[in-house]
Amino acid sequence: MLIRNIIEIALIVILFIVGIIIYFYLKRRIDDAESDLVIRKKKEIKEDIED
Amino acid sequence: MKKQYKAMGALALATAFIAINGVIADASPLGTNNYYVGADVHTGSNAAHDNTTGGNEIPRTADDTHGEWVIVKEPTYTEDGLRKRGYTSDDGVFHVEFESIQRLMPTPVLPVVPPQPEPSQPGPSLPEESQPSRPTDNSTKFENNKHHGSSKKKRNVESANNNGDAKTLSDKTLPSESKASTQQSVVSTVNTLSDADNKKIEKNSEGNTGKSKISERRAENTVSQKESENTETKAPDSKVDTSEKTDESKVTESAAADETRVAQKQDENNTKVVGKKVDTTPVQTESTKASRSFNGYDGVTILAAGAYTWWIAIVLLPMIDAFKWINKKRREKSRGNVNKKHN
């Protein structure tokens, strides 16, 4: 295997690892934010406002 | 969305930068000389470049692009070598052609080096007083080094010199021959040495006492020992002279032997250098071509980079945007201006 190929593969592997780390970090933060949210229908919200 | 497009463009540029060298090399004509695993291998072209011989030959046309020969196995004195080269036929298929290299000659012919005067061995000095029995170096040296004693000593010394003439002549011829030729010259000089020893033994047996017979029995020993024994029987005072002469003869013999070794080493080095010169250039060209070629690793790298770019654009960038939005809302909530617009 040539040095050029080794450098290419090493660069791709490093980028994959960095992307996976970022993905799991963001997923955790987003899950935490979504846990606080409650999905309600628009009608229910209007009824609450009218009441 | 603009940020996403910018990030995608940057990643696309990065992937293109990674693979651009291989793509350029693939487009270049040098890429046609590459070998790959599974290529058609033809070993029937063992004779020469003749296309007509052998049924395994692939018919070539004028459009074939032949690569340079690459030595697979070096030829030795006992076995033939092997070399290969690749070419592309009209079909665009790569082929590897093998050809044998003739084995090395057992006695490589080298240019004859003219004999040069050695500093350790001065040139042949002519006899001073018309004495044809002393044409050699050792005789003159011995005359210069001898003690000026009685006339018997001189006669003994002369007889010893006459006995050693043949040997000294052979010693003189040895360095020049060793430079000019190889082992054959060494063998011939050895033969001359043995002849000289035989002559000397005969003369000693005729002229000397019983101690010379003992020296005959020790004919396999060095010549210097024999000479020293002869001189000891007749003149005990000339021990110093004979020892000096033996030293000189030993020095000349050792010098001649060293020269023969040096000549043989030079011959070996010459053959090795020629072989190395034959080897290095094709290997270098092949390595340079291979480094510029587009191989499977480049393809895999490009595919991986594309998939990674797609994943970032579709998955990671929206997650980053969502994270930014969440942080923004948390900051607003902490400031107390949540739903400011609606209020």
Image (tube, helix red, strand yellow):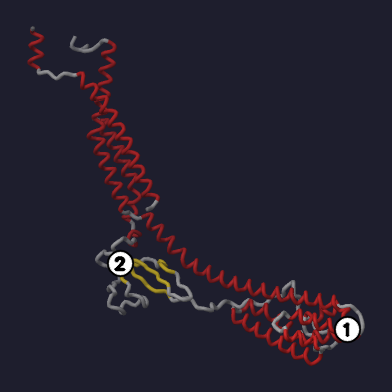
> What is the x, y in percent for residue B40?
28, 67
> What is the x, y in percent for residue B29?
33, 59
Where's the N terminus of chain B, which quadrant? top left
Label for residue B95?
Answer: 2
User: Residue placed at 31% from the left, 60% from the top?
Assistant: B36
> What is the x, y in percent for residue B24?
33, 52
Left or right for B309, reference B228: left
Query: What is the chain letter for disc 1?
Result: B
Q: Quadrant of residue B295?
A: bottom left
Left or right for B212, reference A27: right
Where's the C terminus of chain B, which quadrant? top left
Q: Amino acid at mark 2?
A: His
In the depicted structure, whether residue B269 falls above or below residue B212:
above
**Which of the two marks, 1 or 2, is nearer to us in this view?**
1
The residue where tag 1 is placed is: B153
Q: Earlier in the sequence, mark 1 or mark 2?
A: 2
User: Residue placed at 63% from the left, 72% from the top?
Assistant: B261
Q: CA distance from mark 1 to mark 2?
A: 84 Å
Of helix, strand and loop, which one carries label 2?
strand
In the depicted structure, whether residue B92 falls above or below residue A28:
below
In the depicted structure, whether residue B127 falls above or below residue B308:
below
Furthest toward the right, the residue is B150
Q: Amino acid at mark 1?
A: Lys
Query: What is the chain letter for disc 2?
Result: B
Q: Quadrant of residue B209?
A: bottom right
Mark 2 nearby-residue class (10 Å; few <14, some 14–19, many ≥20)? many
Q: Quadrant of residue B183?
A: bottom right
Mark 1 nearby-residue class (10 Å; few <14, some 14–19, many ≥20)? some
Q: Are marks 1 and 2 in contact (CB under 8 Å)?
A: no
Furthest toward the bottom, the residue is B206
Of helix, strand and loop, which one carries label 1?
helix
